[in-house]
Every structure is written in C-alpha cells, then in structure tokens.
Image (tube, rainbow, N blue to C red):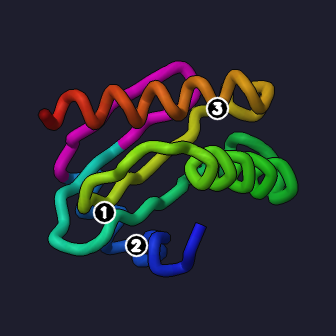
Amino acid sequence: MKKKNIVKESRDFNVAFRKKNQTCSKYAYLYTVSTGKNYRFGICVSKKIGNAVTRNKIKRRVKDIIDKSKLLFDDKDYIIVLKKSASSAEYLELREDILSLLKKSMEQEK
C-alpha cells in the first residue's frame, strides 16, 4: 500500500467516526467518508486485541488483502476497525470477510 493511500491523521479518523456511515461484518467495521481526493485507507486495531506483535500482524494482513484485491475504489476514506475476533481468524477467513465488507460498502453507495 502506497503511503499516499494511508490515513494517518487522527482528525481524519474522527471525521469518519462522526459521519457514522458504518458497515459491519464478523471481523471488522468499515467507516467511509467521501473526499475529493484519491482513495485512502486507515486501519485501527485496539490494544484489547493483543500485544504489539499481534496488532501489527493483523495490520499487515489487512494491508496485503487490500493490495491484492482487484476492486476499484471510489474517492473516499475507508477506515477499517478490527474486532477482537480478528486476532484468531485465519488469513483466508479474514480475506473473505474484508473483501465482502468492501463490496457491501460499495453497493450501498450506488
């Protein structure tokens, strides 16, 4: 994932949380906010999920899933908040869940 496609500012996360345009699945919540800029992704993993090694492993998996997906993203900020159940999920389960979540979000916008 390119650095220009990553949300890092806390104010951008807060805007997404306040808009409450939320979609949920078994392992994650997805918040979307329309922007005039290029699409960007932000990934939130709570300390409740585990130690730093576990949290970073989950983030790497989600970034890999997004990079390998063939989806065409709109000009939005996509904030993915992972649930505690994501720590015990296998890669393929997490992949199916995240991709279905992104597709569901895109279909709702149309």
From which residue to which does the magenta span run? 19-30
Q: Is residue 110 left or right of residue 67?
A: left
Q: Label 2 amino acid?
A: Ser
As helix, strand or loop, the secondary structure at mark 1 comes to: helix
Q: How many marks?
A: 3
Where 79 falls versus 100 (above or below)?
below
Name the kind of residue labelled 1 in the image. Answer: Asn
What's under tag 3, amino acid-wise? Arg
Labels 3 and 2 touching (C-beta < 8 A): no
User: 92 or 23, which lies in front?
Assistant: 92
Q: Position of residue 67 (x, y in %)?
A: 60, 54
Question: Residue at the spot x=64%, y=32% of the render?
Answer: 95
Location of residue 93 in the rendering, given as x and y in whole percent from the top left corner: 69, 22
**Mark in front: 3 vs 1:** 3
Q: Quadrant of residue 88?
A: top right
Does the residue at mark 2 contact the one at mark 1 (Cβ under 8 Å)? yes
CA separation, marks 3 and 1?
26 Å
Tell me where residue 28 appears, x and y as whole percent.
51, 33
Residue 95 image label: 3
Residue 23 magenta: yes
Vertical placement of residue 21 versus 40, above or below: above
| Residue to which mark 2 is pinned | 10
Name which quarter of the figure residue 104 lies in.
top left
For the residues marked 2 and 1, what is the alpha-carbon distance in whole angstroms? 6 Å
User: Is 68 on the left-hand or right-hand side of 11?
Assistant: right
Q: Is residue 27 magenta?
A: yes
**Which element type, helix, strand or loop, lies under badge 3?**
helix
Specify few, some or many for label 3: CA neighbours under 10 Å numbering under 14, 14-19, or 20 or more.
Answer: some
Q: What residue sits 41% from the left and 77% below the top?
A: 9
Callout 1: few (<14), some (14-19), or many (20+) C-alpha neighbours within 10 Å? few
**Residue on which disc 1 sits:** 14
Quadrant housing the N terminus: bottom right
